[in-house]
């Protein structure tokens, strides 16, 4: 797979879909600098694709750059407002930084966009969010 992507990119270094696919492959291989280089190039070539920003956000999250990941996810949603993947990842990001209200808001937004989302995911996510938001503090135990 990598060899074929390298060949395509070797013939056309501005092939954004191939750069995006190679970045995703590098991401799974934990080759973050290479993935970042490809994603920056793909977005320079074509910044109109919401999935490119989602992949960039995934990369930024594993690099502990949550602020930049949030910006990438927001850009993805601005391009494609019904992108449930970006909306749910933004909800997860807010959960990670313990902004539970925004996490709930984005989870609800995803469900409004696509009611076919698994009920298990819905209840699991909302149960966890509600637990974390309303759990008794140590001083209350």
Image (cartoon, rainbow, N blue to C red):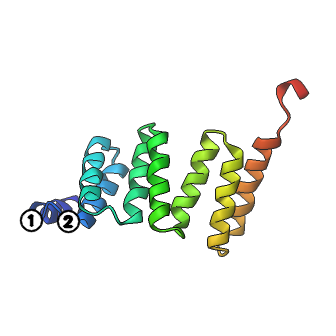
Which of 47 and 25 lies nearest the eye of the viewer?
47
Q: Quadrant of the C terminus?
A: top right
Secondary structure, mark 1, is helix
Q: Front-most of 117 and 78?
A: 78
In the picture, the disc for residue 11 is 1
Q: Is residue 46 left or right of residue 97?
A: left
Asked whether disc 2 touches disc 1, contact meaning CB atoms under 8 Å apart, the reply is yes
In the depicted structure, whether residue 24 falls above or below residue 139: below
The foreground one among 30 and 103 is 103
As drawn, the label of residue 107 is none
Q: Residue at x 65, y 75 (%)?
A: 116
Q: Give coordinates of residue 42: x percent, y percent.
A: 26, 58
The quarter holding residue 68 reads top left
Q: Would you say 137 lies left or right of 69 here?
A: right
- Above or below, 34 against 85 in this view is above
Is residue 38 at least partly visible in the picture?
yes
Q: Quadrant of the rendered structure where residue 109 is?
A: bottom right
Q: Residue at x 50, y 62 (%)?
A: 77
Q: To which residue does mark 2 refer? A: 15
Looking at the image, residue 95 lies above or below residue 13: above
**Residue occupying the point 67% across, 49% down:** 102
């Amino acid at each position: 797979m990598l060899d074929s992507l390298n060949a395509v990119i070797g013939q056309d270094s501005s092939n954004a879909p191939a750069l995006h696919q190679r970045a995703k492959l590098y991401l799974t291989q934990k080759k973050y600098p290479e993935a970042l280089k490809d994603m920056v190039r793909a977005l320079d070539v074509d910044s109109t694709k919401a999935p490119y920003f989602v992949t960039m956000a995934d990369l930024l999250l594993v690099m502990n750059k949550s602020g930049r990941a949030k910006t990438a996810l927001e850009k993805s949603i601005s391009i494609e407002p019904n992108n449930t993947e970006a909306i749910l990842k933004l909800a997860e990001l807010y959960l990670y930084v313990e902004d539970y209200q925004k996490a709930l808001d984005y989870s609800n937004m995803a469900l409004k966009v696509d009611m076919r989302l698994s009920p298990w995911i819905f209840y699991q996510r909302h149960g966890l969010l509600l637990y974390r938001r309303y759990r008794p503090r140590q001083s209350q135990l």
